[in-house]
Image (cartoon, helix red, strand yellow):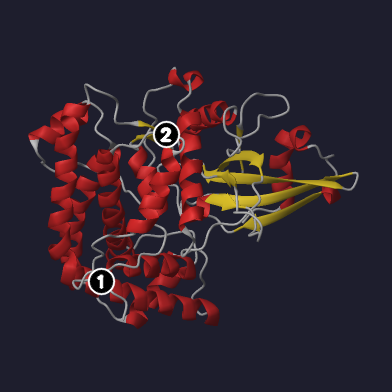
Amino acid sequence: MFSHDGLLTVLSHWMTSVGAPSQEPDLRITPVQPGFSGGRVYRVDATREEETTSWALKGWPSSTPRERMAKISQRIVAASQHCDLLAPPLPGIKSSRTSIEALGHHWELARWITGTPLPADASDDEIARGGEAIGRVHLALNTDANREHQSTLIESPSIQETTLISPPISPHVASASSARLPRCLTDRLSRLHQLTAAIASLAGYDHSVDKIATRLATQLTDETLGDPASDFHCRQLAESLVEASIWLRRYWNVFAPGLLERLQRHANDAQPMFAERPLTTWVLRDVHREHILFEPSKRDRPRSVQGVFDYDAVDVDSPAADVARWAGDFSSTVNSALGLSVHQNRVPLEATVAGYRDVCSFSEWEFDVAKTLIEVNSIGSLGNWTTWLIAKNRHFPVSASRIRSRIIHLIASVCRIC
């Protein structure tokens, strides 16, 4: 998307910081598979006197609010003084600013975190280490140095959570919201209500695999209509979307009312707690399995966490939001006859909480909220992807195979796979 010379111009803002001379042969710039948010990521290997250091260059579309980026950067820089798992953005040579505008994007540079994410069937001990890492990050995000910036950030929802307009809900929830009811409850209450109507409308859309596959090739920027490999991957994704749509139309009204009731109950139960302690704190809000990197496996000792990255969604919310997102990315083994797991990811959740509690407190109310969020995240995300791609004609800067991998995991989370 960007020329090598263009990226070198961007890097010149930090050239002293990365410790490399400006001559082009000393820098190797490699594109990296981006996330779902629309940003572009490059690995920069800077070599000087036979010593190489690596950095992550990330660009966001110019439409990304600059004020939000600055506030997140400020908090991550401060938190990194207390937690070496974070990779804060670097200031430039002649300015303390951590981002610049060029090539129609906002750019930041940070150290490259080495390591690999855990597999979906990771051991409880490894999952617990991820929970401990989340706890360490939470402590760092909420140090005294950060408390003077405790106002909520400008909201910039990820593709997992669209901008929401709350439907009429209990007066208890409305009053609790004014006292900082966690977004993980208010957002999901609203989104499940919205999805109920959206999923009911799916029946009116063409579910021809061929037609959906053809349209996907134009909706996904990493695919090309007419390319044999793209056509194959788009068809695979189309088949998964049709399977998801069938499941959603058959079971949404079986499970969604119960999930809405549980979210409502958590919100109501929160009211008497406000006088005792805050229920929200600064959290990552989008800490998936691929966002915590571990060192390679070793026989003689457990793998340790190397770093935590992707701070785009940082905001005030319940710690349960991060715990649920992390635990929910691991395989579930206990399923009910109806299809939805009775104890969705029960063991991964317990492992995550055990690790988290080694560092931070985590109440029984938060545990119950996290358990509900895991199920809501699964069925809600499946509903999001299906309606976005079949009904809304949404466009995404990723490949069909990546979305299909996410959808397969979500289907496995809510269905009994025969």
Considering the image in quadrants, where does the N terminus appear? bottom right
Numbered tag placed on residue 360 in the rendering:
2
Q: Is residue 339 above or below residue 12?
A: below
* Residue corresponding to mark 1: 245
Picture residue at 71% right of the left edge, 34% below the top: 13
Does the residue at mark 2 contact the one at mark 1 (Cβ under 8 Å)?
Answer: no
Q: Residues within 10 Å of mark 2 (few under 14, many from 20)?
A: some
Left or right relative to 274: residue 385: right
User: Which circle, 2 or 1, is nearer the viewer?
Assistant: 2
In the rendered image, residue 354, in percent from the top left (x then y), is placed at: 41, 45
Q: Is residue 2 above or below residue 238?
A: above
Mark 1 falls on what kind of element? helix
Given residues 10 and 91, the one toward you in this image is: 91
Q: Residues within 10 Å of mark 1 (few under 14, many from 20)?
A: many
Dividing the picture into quarters, in which one does residue 364 lie?
top left
Mark 2 falls on what kind of element? loop
Given residues 416 and 169, the one toward you in this image is: 416
Compare marks 2 and 1 and give the one earlier in the sequence.
1
Three-letter residue code for mark 1: Ser
Three-letter residue code for mark 2: Cys
